[in-house]
Image: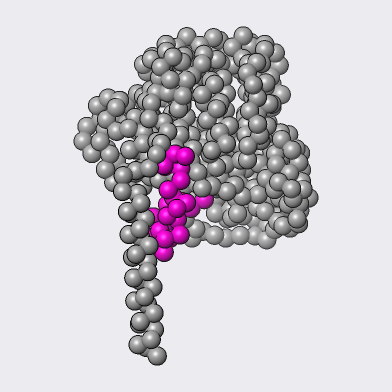
Amino acid sequence: MPYFACSLARYGFIAAVLFPTLASAAVPIGEPVGSLLSHNERVLGFMTNRIRVDPASADALLSMDGKTPSGRPIPPVTPPLELVADLARAAHFQSTHIATTDCPLCVDHSTCCVLAGMDDATHCEGPVTDCGVTSMGQRFSHFSDRAHEENGAEGYGSPELAILGWIGSDPHWGSINSAYATALGTGFAQGFGKPVYHLVFGSDGTYPVAGDGVHFRDIIRDGSFGAKLQPEDTPTFGITYALPGGGPPQVAQVVHYTDGVTPVCEPLALRHGQPDQGTYEAVLSPGPGCHRYFFHIVDGQGVERLYPTTGTLGFPLLPLGADPASCPDFEPTRAEAPCAGTDPQDTTGSDTDSDTDSGGDGSSSDASETSPTGNPTSDGPTGAATGDDPTGDEPTGGDPTGGDPTGVATTTSTTEPATAGEPATGDSDAGCGCRTEGRAPGEGAAFTSLIVLTGWLLRRRARARRGAS
């Protein structure tokens, strides 16, 4: 079992008692918290879980020739992944590092500088040079001790297309459907004309009954050549529901406000997976404007679940030239919604940001064609998926508006040439260091020291109580 995937479970209780700052790094974040998560990052999380609960449907996406499924064995269904802060910070850091510096999307998932600091304070100490300076495992250690695997992609015009590139690559596909993963961090950054996406997989996660709702542009499969996305003005709204053995939701709705204050409750229907573990979705045409929304679920046991738990998410259909900040990705307040039985909220003091990100908004019927092409070694605004096996070629990505960006995606094992558009033209790609096996030196001693220290603290507290009495 990977060391990074198991040590937090072993130390979790003692760390929470003695080192509360460390324990807080693993807080679940199924909604925006601080700078996490942006809209594109939530799309990555939802679509990853959508694949896991129904891999057969995802694998039926168009293959390289635009007509046939991949023909590979379909993996078994796996539970959705909990979105957590420590893994999200790791994913967001690497995406930002690649998007805003001269560091390429490294085949071995390394970072192009020496790292210093921990968690949000992690930064490059010294110059950014080339791949191989800090390994993936070393980078993970700055954010989490349960991260063990990663997918990366560069140049795709939207998170939906980045997911499509990973679907078309066997190692990325394997990472997404891994039974070893129970937690996920997603990262997105844009800089110098190149969008960069990452998924960091880890352990010790438990997906909540409803914890990843978002609007997105679904991928349309009509048998034609190339990938197509829904139009922006008719997006899909979806959330993963997971209560295995507990029955389907009694109520599944997306609640959106037509004018900012008037709520409309739209029913969601099972789209992928099984009734007690699947995605519930609806395609809507809300019209121009800034639309606030949240998800209202009453689970199979009659318990109400809201996502986000406070506030609303934003779906912007703004006129040309409008300020994107006028429709923030997240607002901490929520107007009353009688159709969902919810009271108004005002949580202005909550630890939230409004990271606006319009790069993945969605829609349905009239499809805009994309022409993803790729070369994993190309420079400039490229899209790419990189893998960990030196024998693999790269899937390709693209821009949904029909531009030329090429695509590359990186993961933990061999990548195969595949895309929902033109054939991949990438060179062989490889990676290493994606799983850290075994136990770190001194792990047993560290654990024993923690136990001894805990016992000493408990004995000291007991003596203090006896003295006080």
Residue at left 46%, top 14%? 393
Q: Is residue 403 visible?
A: no
In-image side of 354 versus 75 (left or right): left
- Residue found at the very far bottom of the displayed protein: 469
- Residue found at the very far left of the displayed protein: 126
In the figure, 370 relative to 279: above or below?
A: above
Residue at left 46%, top 24%? 413
In-image side of 389 versus 64 (left or right): left
Quadrant showing the C terminus: bottom left
Residue at left 36%, top 36%? 137
Q: Position of residue 339 (x, y in %)?
A: 76, 53
In-image side of 231 versus 423 (left or right): right
Q: Is residue 16 visible?
A: yes
In the figure, 378 relative to 288: above or below?
A: above
In the figure, 119 relative to 397: above or below?
A: below
Residue at left 49%, top 37%? 201
Q: Main secondary structure of the magenta part?
A: helix
Q: Nearer the viewer, residue 14 or 329?
A: 14
Using the rendered view, name the quadrant where residue 140 is placed: top left
In-image side of 352 versus 313 (left or right): left
Q: Position of residue 391 (x, y in %)?
A: 44, 14
The colour mode here is one colour
Q: Nearer the viewer, residue 115 or 433?
A: 433
Q: Position of residue 205 (x, y in %)?
A: 54, 47
Q: Position of residue 321 (x, y in %)?
A: 51, 32
> Per the image, is 196 magenta?
no
What's drawn in magenta, residue-wise? 1-28
Q: Nearer the viewer, residue 146 or 424?
A: 146
- How many marks are shown on the rendered structure? 0
Q: Nearer the viewer, residue 386 or 204?
A: 204
